[in-house]
Image (cartoon, rainbow, N blue to C red):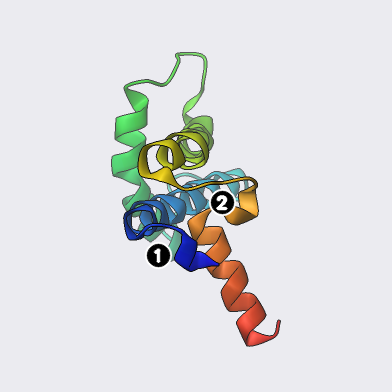
Amino acid sequence: MITLIPPLGILIDIPLGILMWTLSLQFVLGIFISENSRLKFVQIIRGVNTPVLVLTNLIRPGFIIDRLAPLYAALILFIARYYLFPLIIGFDVESFTQMPLEKLLLSAKTDLGL
């Protein structure tokens, strides 16, 4: 299943997928935890996502507040992963579960029998 995707697609999609999910996690954590939290887990996630947030701040509209910025960046990455990269690299994505990272995770889940 995962072997139908070109290796370049896997190399590009997996890091962007991980960034997309960490940005979503940062948004969810931002709802429940204050922004200046000293938890190591929150600091690591914030440190990983900072370069992506800086890049998306260049194209972010002014009406999107700072607390929504991680969700906006995750949406931009999702759109790129779902629409742009399959066109450029040349693989088919018919649903969310057929994106390379998610397909890899789902195949690992079935291999483990979960």
Q: Quadrant of the N terminus?
A: bottom right
Give the number of the disc on residue 40: 1
Percent x, y of residue 37: 45, 53
For residue 33, above or below residue 111:
above
Quadrant placement of the C terminus: bottom right
Estimate the spatial distance between the alpha carbons at disc 2 and disc 1, rounded to whole Å: 13 Å
Numbered circles on residues, count:
2
From the image, tell me which residue sits under label 2: 29
Q: Amino acid at mark 2?
A: Leu
Give percent across and percent down for residue 109.
Answer: 63, 76
Of residue 45 and residue 81, the one placed in the foreground of this image is 81
Q: How packed is label 1: few (under 14 Cα within 10 Å), some, or many (20 or more)?
A: few
* Residue at 54% over, 47% down: 24
Helix, strand or loop for disc 1: helix
Q: Is residue 11 visible?
A: yes
Residue 63 placed where, x, y %? 52, 14
User: Of marks 2 and 1, which one's residue comes earlier in the chain?
Assistant: 2
**Can residue 67 be seen here?**
no
In the image, what residue type sits under mark 1?
Lys
